[in-house]
Amino acid sequence: MQQVSPTRMNLLNLKRQIKMATQGASLLKNKRDALMNEFRKLLGDVIRERKKLEEEIRRSVNILMITIGIDGMEALESAALSSGRRLEIEIIPRRAWGVRVTEFKYGSIIRSLAEKGFIPLSVTSRITLTADSFERAIDTVLKVIPLEYKLKKFGEEIRKTNRRVNALEQKLIPELQEQVKFISQVLEDREREDKFRLKILKRKAEKKKEGEGTF
């Protein structure tokens, strides 16, 4: 930091800057603590949904293998073709604690048998069960993605906020305090010198007055 002129005005300005920087650091720490609390809660949600997704994918794959083994790939592919669908997902930007995140908005993923487009007598219960299982897995995927994105953005914001707090508390504020210390010392030295000069002038004036009084 550039050394400033040792004046009382600069001293007052520096003290004001220290006060503002200290308040800013306090606000940032409060924000960081709030973000950390939200991060922990969000992490719990992500872990829970991730575990659910892993279980659903494992179950879906097991059901799929059984269905292929019993009903055959052709029957499964035929059902998949008759069950064609278009999934529309709206990505909605949001802000949480000043952090830009996104949310997904979409219709129901899990459909009834009639909504799947199957002809009831043309598919087995295993094929229906396979479709239901993968629909649940897709629904969970669409829940996990925005949660993980939000978790990532919160983590980045926490790191950025922490860097700003450290920059204030470990760099800017100590540098300002050093400036205050330097200016205060210079001003104190000047004040002592001024007092010393005043004493000398006063003694000279007194001696001069005494000398004039002898005539």
Image (cartoon, rainbow, N blue to C red):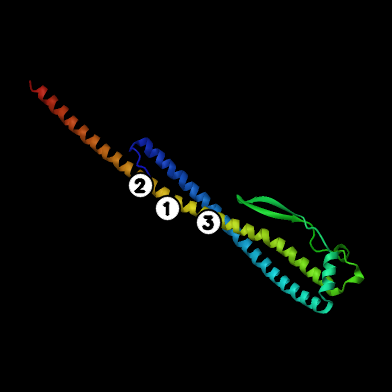
Q: Which type of secondary structure does the marked residue at label 1 adopt? A: helix
User: Sequence order check: which comes first, mark 1 or mark 3?
Assistant: 3
**Circle 3 residue:** 159
x, y percentage for residue 28? 52, 51
Q: Are marks 1 and 2 in contact (CB under 8 Å)?
A: no
Residue occupying image coordinates x 67% and y 50%: 93
Residue at figure coordinates x 50%, y 50% from the top left: 26
Q: Which disc number belongs to residue 184?
A: none
Which residue is located at x 35 percent, y 47 percent?
A: 178
Instruction: Classify the position of the C terminus by image quarter.
Output: top left
Residue at numbered disc 2: 178
Q: Residue furthest bottom?
A: 70
Mark 2 belongs to which amino acid? Glu
What residue did someone put label 1 on? 170
* Farthest right residue in view: 121
- x then y, percent, for residue 166: 46, 53
Crowd class of label 1 (few under 14; some 14 to 19; many from 20; radius 10 Å): few
- Could you say which quadrant of the image residue 42 lies in? bottom right
Secondary structure beneath dot 3 equals helix
Pick the front one: 69 or 177: 69
The earlier-in-sequence mark between 2 and 3 is 3
The three-letter amino acid code for the residue at tag 3 is Arg
Answer above or below: position of 105 versus 203: below
In the image, farthest residue toward the left: 215
